[in-house]
Amino acid sequence: MSLAETELTIGGTSFKGVYIAILLSLATTLGGGVWTASSLYSRLEAVESQKIPDIAPLEEKILLVEQELSANDVSQLQGKLATLGVSLQTIADQQEKLLLIRNDVNDMKQKVAEMKATVQKAELLSADIKDFNKDVSVAKREIQDLWDAMDYLSNPLN
């Protein structure tokens, strides 16, 4: 049994299946439209029933904020921020230079410590050389005394 062969008889009038299908689809579409309109209307009524709050206190607060902004001279804030940015950049550059100087100072401290060690070694060597020179001068004097004694022994009448 197909939709084309189906018939419905109501009050002596027969309706074919295709017409029933068209009538049913129109009826559901109209019902859906009525339901949507009813839902929209109830939403509109809900929005209308809400009270709109008084915005006068908000307007006063906005005016106060505007007055404070004008009193604090916010219009020149961008210029001040630019100056501050340049100052911060200068400080960062100077800090880099100071770090380099600190590294150089640390290197110099290390070199000075090495030089101190070298000077101490030189002082020890100098003391050893003084002792050696003293010993050499004593040896020279003894040698000279020996030569003088030999000269005396070779010619005692002189």
Image: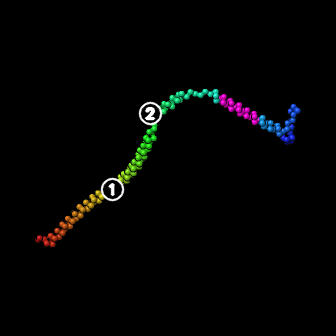
User: As shown in the figure, which amino acid type bears the numbered disc 2?
Assistant: Ala
Q: Quick one: label 1, few (<14), some, or many (20+) residues within 10 Å? A: few
Q: Which residue is mark 2?
A: 71
Please state which of residues 70 and 128 is positioned toward the viewer in this rendering. 70
Asked if residue 138 is positioned above or below residue 45 in the image, the reply reads: below
Which residue lies at the image location 20% right of the left edge and 65% below the top edge?
141
In the rendering, at what x and y percent does residue 83 appear?
42, 43
Quadrant location, the N terminus: top right
Return the mark for residue 21: none
Q: Give the farthest residue toward the front.
A: 13
Q: Over which residues does the magenta segment extend?
A: 28-46
Q: How is the image coloured?
A: rainbow
Which residue lies at the image location 82% right of the left edge and 37% below the top edge?
20
Q: Helix, strand or loop at disc 1?
A: helix
Q: Is residue 119 left or right of residue 41?
A: left
Which residue lies at the image location 39% right of the left edge and 51% below the top edge?
100
In the rendering, at what x and y percent does residue 72 appear?
44, 35
Q: Which residue is mark 1?
A: 115
Asked if residue 61 is positioned above or below residue 137 in the image, the reply reads: above
Please state which of residues 49 and 95 is positioned toward the viewer in this rendering. 49
Q: Give the farthest residue toward the right.
A: 12
* Residue 38 drawn in magenta: yes
Asked if residue 52 is positioned above or below residue 109 in the image, the reply reads: above
Magenta stretch: dominant SS?
helix
